[in-house]
Image (cartoon, helix red, strand yellow):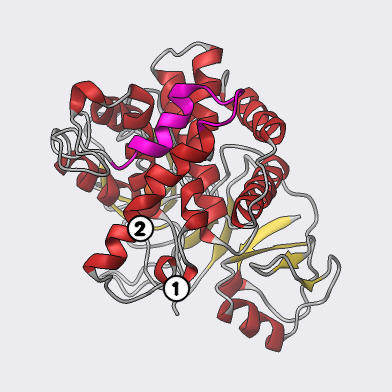
Amino acid sequence: MKRIAIYNAKPGMILAKEIYNRNGRLLLRENAVLTKRWIDKLAGYGIPTVFIRSGGYNPREVVQKRVQPSSGKKAKRFYQSEIPDMIPADIREEAERAIQEIMHNVKTGRLIRTEKVKKVVEKILSQLINNVHIIGKLADIRILDDYTFAHSVNVCILSISTGVVMGYSKNRLRELGIGALLHDVGKMNIPDEILQKRGPLTEKEFEEIKRHTLLGFEMLSQYADITWNAARISLQHHECFNGSGYPWGINDKDIHEYSKIVAVSDVYDALTADRVYKNAILPYEAMEIIIASSGYQFDPEIVKLFVEHCEIYPVGSIVELNSGETGVVIDVNRGLPTRPMVQVIADIEGNELDNGPEIDLMTNPTIFVNAILSFRRTIGP
Ligand SMILES: [Fe+2]
């Protein structure tokens, strides 16, 4: 099974997983053969990726695919890569479906099944607790075609990863993960017309959106098995370090550390996510925005840690080196996100190399990444 971007899908490919729309209606079954019409339709629905059948798939393997020559000055050929996710696809899928069900329940006035939340967080935690030395940009997967669910899961993964590098105990990671997964649950009580409005919001509409923090907290604080600090994440994740946030405008000392972590994860994922109506920006560009907001919007200590450990050049990124060669990032060095391990895929002239040398930028200080050439493309409206 292989996940590919919808724009790379070709008629005749066979689906390895069913596709649902945002209302949970089945669009295409597993084993359906893609047609040109369906590919256009799925792209039109804003479904960025599909799983297709292929001969063997190793999630840690960088799958390279030749694409059109770039329009860069050297008109080099380069590769499009799939970036492996931090957690396996089946756990992500379970997590997205769980948060979908939770949000649906909230919307229809039913109770949240907290045991389900705990189960999902436990699974994510078990994947990250021993593995994390980086806070990774996640492979951009939308198993369900709804941004909210994937975003909630991403914020949960990013926040737990941050907690792991901060040395949190398992119990604290659990609390953080539960609160992070549910941080925007209050949005389910805000009218869809406002949430999905594409144009600028009126002042009144923005005031309404702000209420998702209070509504979420009111809801979550009623559950005996959601701790006070976990519930407070929904209340405080839009508060700012300098007191300019909402709903209360509290500052540094009054904002709980969990909420500060989720605030950074929330903005980072929102900036780097592919959404139908906006192009995502690259991780290092998002990082610059986060750094610029350090001390204003975000706690500088958390930003420092996030930057030190964030995977700025995710595995699979195609990069241009200062030597003029083109490479693909094949590994990330712990604590030194700007010095990844790179395999050269094209020489200075742009000639492709089948088995180019591997360069560890940590031990080759004179070589550095000049630019990211590509790691994915977004789907336009
Ligand atoms: Fe929010």
**Residue 235 belongs to magenta span:** yes
Which kind of residue does numbered mark 2 sit on?
Answer: Ile
Which kind of residue does numbered mark 1 sit on?
Answer: Glu
- Residue 230 in the image, given as x and y percentages of width and height: 47, 27
- The crowd level at tag 1 (other Cα within 10 Å; few <14, some 14-19, many 20+) is few
Q: State which tag comes first along the sequence, 1 or 2.
A: 1
Q: CA distance from mark 1 to mark 2?
A: 11 Å
Residue plotted at (57% across, 43% down)? 85
- Residue 105 in the image, given as x and y percentages of width and height: 66, 51
- The crowd level at tag 2 (other Cα within 10 Å; few <14, some 14-19, many 20+) is some
Residue 357 seen: no
Residue 189 seen: yes
Which residue is disc 2 drawn over? 209
Would residue 332 be found to the left or right of residue 238 on screen? right
Q: Secondary structure at mark 2?
A: helix
Q: Nearer the viewer, residue 306 or 77?
A: 306
**Residue 225 belongs to magenta span:** yes
- Residue 132 in the image, given as x and y percentages of width and height: 50, 24
Residue 4, quarter of the rendered image: bottom right
Q: Which mark is residue 57?
A: none
The quadrant of the picture occupied by the C terminus is: bottom left
Q: Which residues are magenta?
A: 221-238
The quadrant of the picture occupied by the N terminus is: bottom right
Q: Nearer the viewer, residue 196 or 298?
A: 196
Which residue is disc 1 drawn over? 193
Q: Secondary structure at mark 1?
A: helix
Question: On screen, 168 above or below 6?
Answer: above
- Residue 59 in the image, given as x and y percentages of width and height: 66, 43
Residue 234, quarter of the rendered image: top left
Question: On screen, 357 above or below 105?
Answer: above
Residue plotted at (45% across, 65% down)? 275
